[in-house]
Image (cartoon, rainbow, N blue to C red):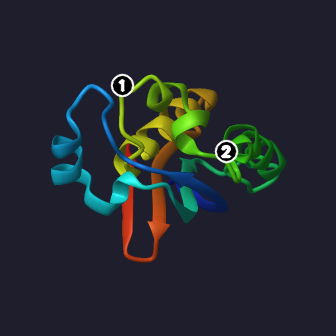
Amino acid sequence: MPETSLIRTLSFSARHHYGRADRPEEWNEERFGDQRRPHRHEYTLVITVTGPPDPETSFVVDLGWLDRLLHEVVIPLEDTSLNESIPEVRSGKVQPSTEALALWFWERLAPRFDGEVRLSRLQLWENEHLGAQVEG
C-alpha cells in the first residue's frame, strides 16, 4: 500500500533574542545587530506525518494523539521567552535561531512515533518570509 502524509500546523507566539555572553559586546553587535534585543514572533510549526493509512480508519495517525503531542511540546512555549524556556538556549549552548528551534522540536517529536508512521518533515516559520525545515 502506498504511503500517505498528513500535514498539521500549530501556531504559537514567543519572544527571543540573540547574543553570546562569552563574547564581547562588539562581537555580538557585529553578528546579531538589532536582533540582540528581545522581539516577538508568531511562529507556525508545520509537521508532516507519513505512513500507510490504517485499513480500518483510513487515518495515517490518530489526530487526537497527534494534537495532544503537539500541545505537550509546543504550548509550554506560548508567550514565553525562548531564551529562558529552552534549556539549551538558556545555557548558551545554542542560539534561538529558526534552524536551531526546528531541530529542537524535531528531537522532541520524532522519537514519539513508532511503527510504520514517522515524522517525515518539520517546518518552523517565524514569519511568512523566514522558516527552517528538518527532514528525516
Badge 2 or badge 1: first in the primary sequence: 2
- Tell me if 20 is positioned left or right of 117 in this view: left
- Residue 54 versus residue 43: which sits nearer the camera? 43
Extreme residue in the bottom direction: 128
Q: Can residue 1 be seen from the camera position used here?
A: no
Q: Amino acid at mark 1?
A: Lys
Relative horizontal placement of residue 118, taking residue 34 as reference (left or right) = right
Residue 18 versus residue 123 in the image, above or below: above
Which residue in the structure is indicated by mark 1?
Answer: 93
Q: Secondary structure at mark 2?
A: helix
Q: Is residue 134 visible?
A: yes
- Identity, as a three-letter code, of the amino acid under mark 2: Leu
Count residues near mark 1 (Cα–Cα under 10 Å), then give few for <14, some for 14-19, many for 20+: few
Residue 59: x percent and y percent? 73, 54
Quarter of the C terminus within the rendering: top left
Residue at horizontal 46 percent and vertical 26 percent from the top: 88
- Residue at 53 percent of width and 34 percent of height: 110
Please name the residue that numbered disc 2 is placed on.
Answer: 77
Residue 111 on image: x %, y %: 56, 27
